[in-house]
Image: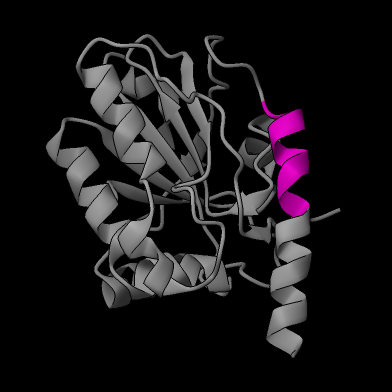
């Protein structure tokens, strides 16, 4: 019952993200964040490549749906095989549910077999707020020119049930395939779903 209330509250947080997010076709907000491995990562350093940004919170049932089933790792691997860079970002503030230290983030990556290029820590929430990231997961794609090409959900099944992945349309991989084919992203803005990002004050 407690989990259901948590899930319901998380789903209710999703629509606000689509209204507040930055604009498709405009320059994506730049940021520099420390990785769990201790190295600073700047988005602008990847200019010329497609970059996928994934907001994450390992305690969120929706994130657990995609990592526990292996769907997030498969999506990360497929994106990277196609030439994209994948950056996972945790904007959970210290003391908030989902916040991770560098050591905890490295342990999470190892446990789940994550395939991202880097796991970035954003405890002040500066990058998350710049992108108006509201849910975990919440996905964005930045094109090689540094413009925002996609923002929204990982797929079209806004549930915490892993069984729904089988029949879901993976919106991130669909967008990447269209970009690789030189086509505009047919659905550049979709509804994100998941838990609210636990920002600090």
- Horizontal side of 103 relative to 153 (left or right) equals left
| Residue farthest to the bottom, as pictured | 1
In the displayed structure, 16 sits above or below 105; it is: above
- Horizontal side of 34 relative to 198 (left or right) equals left
Queried whether the magenta region covers residue 18, the answer comes back as: yes
Q: Is residue 67 visible?
A: yes
Quadrant location of the N terminus?
bottom right
Residue 19: image location, x then y, percent: 76, 30
Queried whether the magenta region covers residue 185, the answer comes back as: no
Residue 133: image location, x then y, percent: 65, 41
* Secondary structure mostly seen in the magenta stretch: helix
Which residue is nearer to you in this view: 175 or 116?
175
In the displayed structure, 130 sits above or below 58; it is: above
In the displayed structure, 189 sits above or below 98; it is: above
Residue shown at the point (28%, 68%) measured from the top left: 70
Looking at the rendering, which quadrant does residue 29 occupy?
top right
Q: Report the magenta residues as a range.
A: 13-21
Which residue is nearer to you in this view: 186 or 110?
186
Residue shown at the point (21%, 19%) measured from the top left: 180
Q: Is residue 103 visible?
A: no
Which residue is nearer to you in this view: 43 or 56?
56
Please give the count of numbered marks on the rendered protein. 0
């Amino acid at each position: 019952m407690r989990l259901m209330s948590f899930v319901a509250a998380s789903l209710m947080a999703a629509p606000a993200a689509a209204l507040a997010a930055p604009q498709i076709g405009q320059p994506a907000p730049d940021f520099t964040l420390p990785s769990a491995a201790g190295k600073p990562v700047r988005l602008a350093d990847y200019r010329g490549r497609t970059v996928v940004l994934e907001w994450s919170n390992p305690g969120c049932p929706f994130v657990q749906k995609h990592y526990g089933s292996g769907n997030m790792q498969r999506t990360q691997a497929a994106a990277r095989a196609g030439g994209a860079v994948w950056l996972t970002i945790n904007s959970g503030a210290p003391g908030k549910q989902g916040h991770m230290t560098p050591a905890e983030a490295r342990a999470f990556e190892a446990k789940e077999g994550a395939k991202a290029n880097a796991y970035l820590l954003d405890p002040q929430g500066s990058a998350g707020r710049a992108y108006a990231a509201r849910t975990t997961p919440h996905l964005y794609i930045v094109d090689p020119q540094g413009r925002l090409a996609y923002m929204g959900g990982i797929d079209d099944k806004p549930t915490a049930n892993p069984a729904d992945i089988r029949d879901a349309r993976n919106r991130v991989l669909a967008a990447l395939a269209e970009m690789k084919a030189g086509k505009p992203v047919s659905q550049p803005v979709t509804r994100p779903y998941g838990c609210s990002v636990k920002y600090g004050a």
